[in-house]
Amino acid sequence: MLGRGVKRKWSCLEEAEVVSEARQLVLGLCLEKLQRYQAGVELSLRRSVLLINTLRQIQEEMRSDGVGSCDVHPDSCLLRDDFREDVTVTCPGCSEGESPPELPSQEANGSDQQKPPAAVSDAVNAMGYLGDLALDDIFEDIDTSMYETSDLPSAWASGSLPQSHSTAGSLQSCLMDLNELDHIMEILVVETHLVGPGLQNGFSL
Amino acid sequence: MCRPGGGSSDVQWCFSQVKGAIDDDVAEADIISTVEFNHTGELLATGDKGGRVVIFQQEPESKNQPQCRGEYNVYSTFQSHEPEFDYLKSLEIEEKINKIRWLPQKNAAQFLLSTNDKTIKLWKISERDKRPEGYNLKEEDGRYRDPNTVTTLRVPIFRPMDLMVEASPRRVFANAHTYHINSIAVNSDYETYLSADDLRINLWHLEITDRSFNIVDIKPANMEELTEVITAAEFHPNQCNTFVYSSSKGTIRMCDMRASALCDKHAKMFEEPEDPNNRSFFSEIISSISDVKFSHSGRYMMTRDYLSVKIWDLNMETRPVETYQVHEYLRSKLCSLYENDCIFDKFECCWNGNDSVVMTGSYNNFFRMFDRGYRQDVTLEASRENSKPRSVLKPRKVSTGGKRKKDEISVDSLDFNKKILHTAWHPLDNIIAVATTNNLYIFQEKLN
C-alpha cells in the first residue's frame, strides 16, 4: 500500500508527506480506539493487542524515518488550551512565543531509540495489563490467578478520563506529533495511579 | 455454465428456508453467534447473543417430493447460558453463545457442548414420546388417591404421548478461563475436549467438571510484553494427540500432546512470509486468523484471515498450498474498515463433506464458495429478495474497476452492517446453513 524506504529527493517529498499524514491519521484512530470503553463490558484482549501493536509499529516507523516532534499546525495548539491547564509539561514546540521548528530534531530521536518507546509502554500501562502485578504485591498469600485483570482498570469506567478534545470528530483534521502523544499518555497514567491498583479491583486498602 | 459445489462443477444452489424474524429491526438477543450441523446432518444447532440454543431437525425425505431434501423444523429451544456478573472485576459476563459442538450419538439422546466467554456446558437433548399411566396411588392428574379407596393393584403401563423434546444440562465446566473462550473442540477419542481462550488452552474430560489440564499457556510473565493472542483451536479429526491453534499474528501451531504435558513447544508452525508489496499499517490486523478447520480427511487445514482463505498441507509449514481471495477489493479500503471497526470482524469458514469445496462469508450478506478441484469460485447472496421457494441463486459480482456492469454492485454500495460470519455445510449432502445477522438461511442443491 504505502511504500517504505522512500528516498528523500525533492520530487518524493510529496509522497513522504502523504505517508506522514496517513501515519498521523492511523495514529489518531489508534488512540481513539484505545481510549474508547464501554462501562461494565470487558474489552476484547485480541482487539487491544492488535491496536497496541499497530501503535507500536507506527511509532517505530516514525522513529526510524526520523520524523520529528512537530508537524503541528499552530492552530492545533490553540485547540489544546482547555486540557493544557491539566498538563504540567508543555510541548516544546508549542510554548509561548516559540514557533515550531521546521526540521525534525535528530538528537531527540537518537536518545529515544535506546529505551522502549515511552508512550507505548504508558499506553500498555493504561490498558491495565500490569494490574495483576500490583495486586500480587499486596495480596501475596491469596491466589489471585483467577482474577487477573485483562481489561481497562475501572478508573476508566468511572469516567475519570479527561474529556480530551481529540476524541471529538475533529480527530482526522487534528495532526498530532509524538510529544502530544506522550502528554496524553502521561495524563492517562497519572489518572490510573491516582485511583490506585487496589481500588481498581474493588478492594480498599 | 459451471458452478462450484459438492465436487461436481455444475451444482446450482436453491433457496430452501429462512428462519428468524422478518422485520429489519434486529433485537440484540436474536443475533446469531454460531451455527453447527451434527455428525449426520439431521440436526442443525444455532446459538445467539441472548444465550439461547435453537435446534432444527430435518424432516425425513418424503416420497412425494423426491427432488427436495427434507426441511428443517424447530426441534428444541432452550436457554443455555444466562448473563452473569463478575463481582471482582465489576464486569458483566455475556451470555452470548460463542460455539456449539456436537458429540457423536451414542444412544437415543443427543449431546452438545455450548460455551459463552467463561463457561462450557454439556447439554443432553432427549425425546419423550411415552408416559406411564395407571399408578396405584396417584390419579392421572397427579393428585394422591385416598389409600382406603385402593382395592386392587395394577402395573402402570406406558402410553404414547405427543413428542416432547427436553434439554437438560448434564455438566457445567466453569472457572477455568480468565480470558474469553473463543473455541471448543471435541477430540476424536470422544472422551476429551479442549477449550481455548485468548492466552490458554485447557483439556477436559467430558465426565469431570472440577478439573482441567492446561496444555497451552502463552501468557507472558510481564503482560507488557504481550503481542499475540490465541484466536482459534481445533483437534485433528482422527489423531487424538494432535491439535492446532491459530494466533492474531497469522501463525498456526500444531502440537502433539504426547510430547509433553504442557504443549508450549509446537511440533510444527505454519506461517506464510509476508508479501512486502502488500505491507501496510494494517498488515498484522488483517493477518489475524479468525478460524481454523481441519479437512474431514485430516490431511489439510483451512485458515481464514480478513481477506483470504488458505489451505495448508499439514506436511508443509512454509506456505499454504492454496490461497483464495474472499474480497480483495477491500484491500484499498482498509483504513475505512479500520475506522468503523469492521477490520476486526471474525469470519468463519467450512469444508463440504468431501473436502472439495470451501465456503466463507463476506459483507452485504454475500458468501463465497471456492471449488478446489475446478478452481472456480462463486459469490452468492442470502437475502429476502431471493427467497422464493426453490428459486436458484444467481451469482453476484462486485465491480472493482471504474465501469460497473449491469447487475454488478460497486464496492462503495456494499452494506458493511450485513455480514455473514457463520456458515455451516451439511457433512454429507449439499445443504448449507448461512447466518445473516438475525436470520438463518438454508440452501440446497438443485436436484432434478
Image (cartoon, coloured by chain):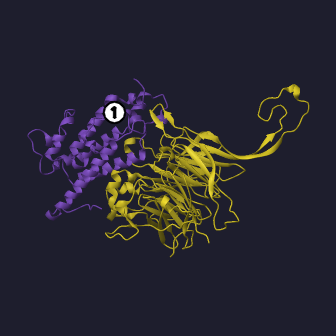
Q: How crowded is mark 1: few (under 14 residues within 10 Å), some or many (20 or more)?
A: few
Placement of the C terminus of chain A among the 4 image quadrants: top left
Of residues B129 and B388, the one drawn nearer to the viewer in this rendering = B388
Q: Where is residue B5 in the image (x, y as percent from the top left)?
A: 54, 68
Q: Is residue B95 positioned above or below A66 on the image?
A: above
Q: Which residue sits furthest bottom?
A: B1
| Quadrant, the N terminus of chain A | bottom left
Q: Using the rendered view, name the quadrant where residue B209 is placed.
A: top right
| Rendered location of residue A7, percent (x, y) | 19, 63
Q: Which residue lies furthest to the top in this view?
A: A205
Determine the colour of chain B. Answer: yellow
Please state if B367 lies on the left or on the right of A164 as rendered.
right
Give the chain coloured purple. A
Name the residue beneath numbered marker 1. A159
> Is A186 in front, or is B212?
A186
Q: Residue furthest left?
A: A97
Q: In which quarter of the image is residue B334?
A: bottom left
The reply to whether residue B51 is visible in this rendering is yes
When asked about the image quadrant of residue B355, the answer is: bottom right
Is residue A89 in sight in this rendering?
no
Q: Residue at x 55, y 47 (%)?
A: B195
Q: Report how many numbered discs are placed on residues in the image.
A: 1
User: What chain does badge 1 belong to?
Assistant: A
Q: Residue at x 16, y 42 (%)?
A: A77
Badge 1 marks a residue whose secondary structure is: loop
Residue B38 horizontal side relative to residue A90, left or right: right
Q: Please name the amino acid that badge 1 sits on.
A: Gly
Position of residue B180 measured from the top left corner of the image (x, y, whole percent): 48, 43
Q: Residue furthest right?
A: B152
**Considering only vertical position in the picture, is B161 above or below B294?**
above
Give the vertical position of B436 relative to B374 (above or below): above
